[in-house]
Image (spheres, rainbow, N blue to C red):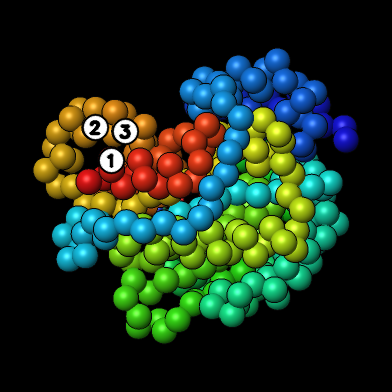
């Protein structure tokens, strides 16, 4: 589809401080440039296993019902629609097509997950700021995504489908949403202001299962779900919490040791490549390939405990 090796490595060339520096503009990039992608994938995910999925319901104890440490839980996955180039290589028309297909599929979500689609085009600044503070919409991508071509035409053809299952006053105030045409065609997200990881995961799994019946996703027999960034293949799952660790904040080496031992990663309070503020860490699984979704959630729960 005309996506070149030069385009695949451009973000890494322009940003020598990249952790990965490689992007796929379509599903074929993974086979066409497999010599390179294979090495990057093995080194990031530490796995040579074939992708296996398990989205069955999970039961787990709530780690911190009193919210002493854990402020919120967010679990997301990434998907791209089969037959359409990925965000680094798609054009305006293809973005509009993805919006149409996703909003169409959202009409078939189970009643608890039904909601509305908010286009990022023509949003006034006040609404934008409010939705951004609530983490419901996404900003234009950073310099890594810029160099990869993901930001072209922003905010045209981008938006968020948002549903608010249940009563906004119910425990944890659960939210289910889909970011459309951010780094991937779909970022499917489930979150709530609690440490009830199982509930957040089960809601996400219901959403994924419903969307998978209406949309055909780009899937590889070995790598599972294919994504713009090779760090997100496989399950595409990033399951994490915002956790306030005031004492470990002063013992970063100890924290990093624990996190590494459980194959987790630390991100900043505002997301990837941001700073940790007021000792609120974003702790989530690092690898998305080589374990089922269920195993990733169980390992996260154990590590946090
Ligand atoms: P992604 O998870 O989509 O790869 P980021 O790490 O940039 O990307 O996170 C996206 C947004 O989600 C950021 O605004 C970040 O602060 C927010 N976020 C991440 N984890 C949580 C959480 N557990 N609770 C609340 N917000 C979160
Ligand atoms: N391309 C960036 C880098 O190599 C980000 C990699 C992982 N994050 C992502 N959002 N895909 O540092």
Which disc is residue 303 wearing? 1
Residue 37 at x, y percent in the picture = 66, 22
For marks 1 and 2 on the same chain, the one whose residue lies earlier in the sequence: 2
Q: Quadrant of the N terminus?
A: top right
User: Which quarter of the figure has residue 71?
Assistant: bottom left
- Residue at 18% across, 47% down: 245
Report how far apart the C-alphas of labels 1 and 2 lie in the structure: 8 Å
Residue nearer the viewer, 208 or 1: 208
Dot 1 lies on which element? helix
Which disc is residue 262 wearing? 3
Q: Is 98 on the left or on the right of 178, as rendered?
A: right
User: Which quarter of the figure has residue 60?
Assistant: bottom left
How many numbered marks, from 0 up? 3
Dots 3, 1 in contact, CB < 8 A: yes
Dot 2 lies on which element? helix
- Residue at 45% across, 81% down: 166
Report how far apart the C-alphas of labels 3 and 1 lie in the structure: 5 Å
- Residue at 84% across, 46% down: 83
Report how far apart the C-alphas of labels 2 and 3 lie in the structure: 6 Å
Residue 95 vertical position relative to residue 13 in the rendered view, above or below:
below
Name the residue carrying label 2: 258
Dots 1, 2 in contact, CB < 8 A: yes
Dots 2, 3 in contact, CB < 8 A: yes
Residue 216 vertical position relative to residue 164 in the rendered view, above or below:
above
């Amino acid at each position: 589809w005309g996506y070149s090796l030069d385009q695949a490595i451009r973000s890494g060339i322009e940003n020598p401080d990249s952790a990965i520096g490689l992007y796929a503009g379509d599903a074929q990039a993974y086979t066409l440039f497999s010599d390179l992608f294979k090495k990057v994938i093995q080194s990031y995910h530490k796995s040579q296993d074939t992708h296996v999925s398990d989205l069955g319901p999970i039961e787990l104890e709530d780690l911190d019902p009193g919210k002493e440490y854990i402020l919120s839980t967010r679990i997301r996955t990434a998907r791209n629609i089969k037959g359409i180039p990925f965000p680094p290589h798609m054009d305006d028309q293809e973005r509009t097509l993805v919006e149409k297909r996703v909003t169409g599929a959202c009409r078939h979500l189970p009643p608890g997950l039904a909601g509305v689609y908010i286009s990022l085009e023509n949003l006034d600044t006040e609404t934008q700021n409010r939705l951004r503070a609530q983490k419901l919409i996404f900003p234009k991508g950073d310099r890594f995504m810029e160099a990869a071509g993901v930001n072209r035409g922003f905010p045209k053809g981008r938006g968020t489908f948002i549903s608010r299952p249940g009563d906004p006053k119910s425990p944890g105030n659960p939210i289910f949403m889909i970011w459309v045409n951010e780094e991937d065609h779909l970022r499917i997200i489930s979150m709530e202001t609690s440490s009830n990881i199982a509930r957040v995961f089960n809601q996400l799994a219901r959403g994924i299962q419903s969307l998978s019946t209406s949309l055909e996703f780009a899937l590889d027999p070995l790598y599972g779900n294919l994504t713009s960034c090779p760090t997100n293949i496989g399950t595409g799952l990033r399951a994490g919490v915002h956790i306030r660790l005031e004492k470990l904040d002063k013992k970063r080496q100890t924290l990093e040791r624990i996190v590494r031992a459980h194959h987790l990663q630390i991100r900043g309070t505002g997301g990837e490549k941001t700073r940790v503020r007021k000792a609120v860490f974003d702790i989530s699984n690092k690898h998305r390939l080589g374990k089922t979704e269920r195993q990733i959630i169980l390992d996260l729960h154990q590590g946090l405990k």
